[in-house]
Amino acid sequence: MNKYIAALPAIRPPFLTLAPLSCLVGLAYCAYQGITIDMFDALLSVLGAILAAIAVNTINEYQDFQSGLDLNTTPTPFSGGSGLLKQNPTLAPIVKRYAVGSVIAVILIGVFFIFRIGAALVPIGLLGLLIVVSYTKVLNKHPWLCFIAPGIGFAILMPVGAFLVQTGIISYSLVAISLVPFLITNNLLLINQLPDIVADKSVGRKHIAIYYGVNVARWVFALSLISAFAGLVCLVIIGLLPKLALIALLPLVLCLLSLVYLFRLGDNIAQHLPAMGMVAAAANLTPLMLSLALFMSKS
């Protein structure tokens, strides 16, 4: 039991907040549409999302240790993994059990909901599972798939899935709303990859900064941020979001501040950790602000 406790850092607890906050957007959209929320289904969908995040983190932790990548990285609070297995390699089998167990638990929750609401959940569940199990070894070798995978998994599939569990339908309006946190979540991954470029390249990864260069990565970050600003305003103008949702512009300003340091420091961004921290904060605060606006403007 002590080994299981010692291995808990591999699930990366500080990075698990995004999963429930992403689900909250879907639940808030239910309330905004006047739909009564079933609390059991809501909590179970949130649990499934958290377990999916744990699965991604532990698979990544274990496979990066197996490939030797951990030995070449210098962890920061936002990148490079937890460093757990680098310090204590004997915990690798426990981390693998966490990974396998969380994947099995996610599948069981998905099967429960499929029997509960029908086959509409199958495409979302299969795509999410594919991202979870293939991210480290497969998607990281494809620049654009690697870039958008976190946004699809967290910012789109989780809120849309949480809404689907409550209603039995997929809301394409919610998909459009989810594009705002989608863009910021992708940028979170992009900036967190920069300190590990040399190490990632050594094991065959080809994310945007490696394949196209740091300057292209900076402009991708900038264009994604501009799109998030413009998208949020457009969603309010066309009425898909209430005017109160403009409070979600505030966390986007944090990304704007980070962008200044990103252009100044490039792959040396870890020299200014607050710049990385502001993007992490924005990725969490954006879905939170959207959820609050939807709950407060509900029918």
Image (cartoon, rainbow, N blue to C red):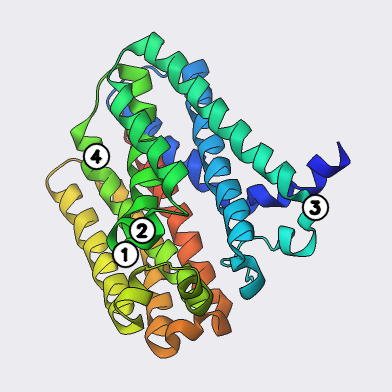
Nearer the N terminus, badge 4 or badge 2?
Answer: 2
Q: Are marks 1 and 3 in contact (CB under 8 Å)?
A: no
Q: Position of residue 223 (x, y in %)?
A: 24, 70
Q: Mark 1 falls on what kind of element?
A: helix
The amino acid on which the numbered mark 3 sits, given as a three-letter code, is: Thr
Q: Identify the residue under disc 1.
A: 143
**Marks 1, 3: nearer the viewer:** 3
Q: Position of residue 20 (x, y in %)?
A: 50, 39
In-image side of 55 versus 178 (left or right)? right
Residue at 50% x, 21% y is: 109
| Residue 47 visible in the picture | no
Q: Mark 4 falls on what kind of element?
A: helix
**Marks 3, 2: nearer the viewer:** 3
Residue at 47% x, 54% y is: 136
The residues bearing labels 4 and 1 have C-alpha atoms spaced at a distance of 23 Å
| Residue 55 visible in the picture | yes
Q: Identify the residue under disc 4.
A: 175
Q: Which mark is residue 90?
A: 3
Q: Identify the residue under disc 2.
A: 146
Nearer the N terminus, badge 4 or badge 3?
Answer: 3
Q: Mark 2 falls on what kind of element?
A: helix
Q: Residues within 10 Å of mark 2 (few under 14, many from 20)?
A: many
The amino acid on which the numbered mark 4 sits, given as a three-letter code, is: Val
Q: Position of residue 238 (x, y in %)?
A: 11, 45
Q: Residues within 10 Å of mark 1 (few under 14, many from 20)?
A: some
Q: Mark 3 falls on what kind of element?
A: helix
The residues bearing labels 1 and 3 have C-alpha atoms spaced at a distance of 33 Å
**Marks 4, 2: nearer the viewer:** 2
Nearer the N terminus, badge 4 or badge 1?
Answer: 1
The amino acid on which the numbered mark 2 sits, given as a three-letter code, is: Cys
